[in-house]
Amino acid sequence: MTVLVLMGTPSNDAVENNPAENNPAASSPAASSPAGNAASHPGESRPDAGPDWQPPVHPALVPGVAVEEVPRRFRTDFLVFGIAIALTIAFIAWGVLGGDSLAATTSSVLSWVIEYTGFFLTSIATVVLVFMLFIGFSRYGRIRLGRDDEQPEYSMFSWISMLFAAGMGIGLVFWGAAEPLSFFEDPPPGTVEARTLEAMHTALTQVLYHWGPQAWAFYALVGGAIAYGMFRRGRTPLISSIFAPLLGENKTTGPIGKTIDVFSIMVTLFGTAASLGLGALQIGHGVEIVTGIGKLGNGVLVGVIAVLTAAFIASAVSGVSKGIRYLSNINSVAAIVLAVFVFFVGPTMLILNVMPAVAAQFIADLPMMAGRSASQGEAMEQFLSGWTIFYWAWWISWSPFVGMFIARISRGRTLRQFVAVVIVVPSIISFVWFAIFGTTAISQQMDGAGLTVDPPEQVLFGVLDNLPFTGVVSVGLILLIAIFFITGADSSSLVMGTLSQQGRPSPSRWVTATWGTLVGVIAAVLLVSGAEGQGLRSLQNVTIIAALPFAVIIALMMIAFLRDLQRDPLILRDKYVNLAVRHSVRSGLEEYGDNFALQPVEYDHGSDDHAWVEEGDLDESLAELYEATTTGSMPVVRSEHVAAPDSVAADSAAPGSDRPDGADSQARDSERPSSTPPAPDAREEGV
């Protein structure tokens, strides 16, 4: 090991008390060692032979290992893929053959989940938010999601557009006017009187609580943990890979890891299908208003689902750098135009006055809203189960696919920047959106517009009907809903394909298309099966039920992520700096007074009782992985748990193959050390 050894002139007191030579380093074993000032790796000694010998890389000096620097063969994991497909088909069959039974079963299970675990779902939202704020704004915030010198892959605007559209874009359009109006007419229990100005402020405050920092904290946790593993430690982009610090680097592909990945696929599938169904209902209602043809039948709604499904599959197979980025920018601009239009033609001054008042009330009421529980009465229990717990479970269910997608587009960001943007910026955007559309809806209702909140998909069109250019704006809204859904659904299809192919960043088109088709089939079948609206309610209930075990996974994910960060090279360097300087300065003051300097020489810390960096904090596996990738001795990593013949699988490039060919990407590649091997060529699978 290396220590900062004192070099200086002893003070008079030091000479009297220590008659050694003025330069103790010159006579110390460290100074006379043939290693000189070279830093040696823990447990390693320099061999006598070989003038070109270089000491192994110390774990604290690893700049980071990106996933594409570790040669891998990504095969279709037919165990994960097959189990997920079988469960999906069984669920579809249940919906077709026994829609009423499915609805009754899911409703009963959901009631049990809310009654006995609602407190856990409510509490974990706040815990995750506090945890991510700690990660982002503590010493860990300096850690980069990539190599130490890596720059962000996407511009700030494109980055925010993609993460926002994938996270909750279509939800904001669906609930933008409906949820504030619902709370205005029926405020949370024990708060204010309905249909008053106070009810308007309370309604918007409650909406911000549901769509604000807590919601995005779930996405930030999953996305940050995956991005860190991918771009800092060379792991595959799988939910199961996050648990390497707990399960072991080579055991995440075992039964536990595969169970986690299957479960991630299922909740992603259900969440996306439910959004498709809701989007189809809102588009159908918009078509009814624009054309005036009356209520549409199920056949037309199925046709809408088919068109949307075909569109997002086409976008998904084009890759994240092409389809999703362009669509995200388009719908971000369209959403801004719509919001600006409603802001200026609606109650502009009321909106401006509401924003600061609601922001202040949100800060003041946040502890009270976070502390609500079923112990406050039956009315509060019903409110929590119908709204707050529903939303927390919904965000948890969406966190696997949204988190994985955010991870893919956040390369090169520091954790501080990542947390600040992913949690704060979308929350601010959500706040402004609800302030514009919610205040407009409430203002119209107070003026006697007669808006109804059941069904919720008609509220926003009702609001636009009271504004100028109703027909044109309604058509634009229909297109906006469609693009928002396409953006979110194609990213979810890519994520499900990645989970099905051992973390392959650019999954095979047939896998992506398979999952996209199943999303459309589930939404269509459940939309027309059973009583009206019963199928989609069953699908939403299943998604919420699945959130309970995934909430447990999220709790363990925080432990695994923190353990990874504690062993990060940057954090290790900080530990060495603090301990080495502290010990050396103390010794310098004791021996030389003010006249000393620090010089690094080799030193054996086993010879003293000073506190030093614990061996358990050193991640030798990361150092070995980095050394193997830079020397070209890294063998191709294969999965030991996939029983797929070589004839039906081929190599794939890791992240980087799906990145843009623009200047940013080229600049980053040119900055990488020449010793870093290029990413393997991407080849499509033959199955």
Image (tube, rainbow, N blue to C red):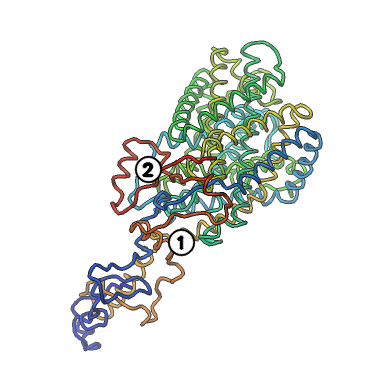
The span from disc 1 to disc 2 (Cα, nearest Å) is: 23 Å
Question: Vertically, is 316 above or below 475?
Answer: below
Quick check: can you spot residue 221? no
Whether residue 153 sits left or right of residue 253 in the image: it is left
Question: Residue flagged by tag 2: what amino acid is it?
Answer: Pro
Instruction: Determine whether the residue tagged by mark 2 lies in a helix, strand or loop.
Output: loop
Query: In the image, what residue occupies the spot 57% across and 48% down?
Result: 77
Please tell me how crowded label 2 is: few (under 14), some (14-19), or many (20+) other residues with Cα within 10 Å. some
Disc 2 target residue:
152
Question: Vertically, is 656 above or below 24?
Answer: above
Asked whether the beta carbons under mark 1 and mark 2 sit within 8 Å of each other, the answer is no
Please tell me how crowded label 1 is: few (under 14), some (14-19), or many (20+) other residues with Cα within 10 Å. some
Question: Residue flagged by tag 1: what amino acid is it?
Answer: Gln
Residue 450, image x, y percentages: 69, 19
Q: Nearer the viewer, residue 656 or 50?
A: 50
Q: Residue furthest top?
A: 292
**Which image quadrant: the N terminus?**
bottom left
Instruction: Determine whether the residue tagged by mark 1 lies in a helix, strand or loop.
Output: helix
Disc 1 target residue:
566
Quick check: can you spot residue 620? yes
Q: Nearer the viewer, residue 257 or 473?
A: 257
Residue 223, image x, y percentages: 50, 46
Query: In the image, what residue occupies the spot 42% across and 67% down?
Result: 618
Q: Earlier in the sequence, mark 1 or mark 2?
A: 2
Question: Vertically, is 274 above or below 250?
Answer: above
Residue 121, image x, y percentages: 66, 49
Residue 185, image x, y percentages: 69, 29
**Which image quadrant: the C terminus?**
top right
Which numbered circle lies on residue 419? none
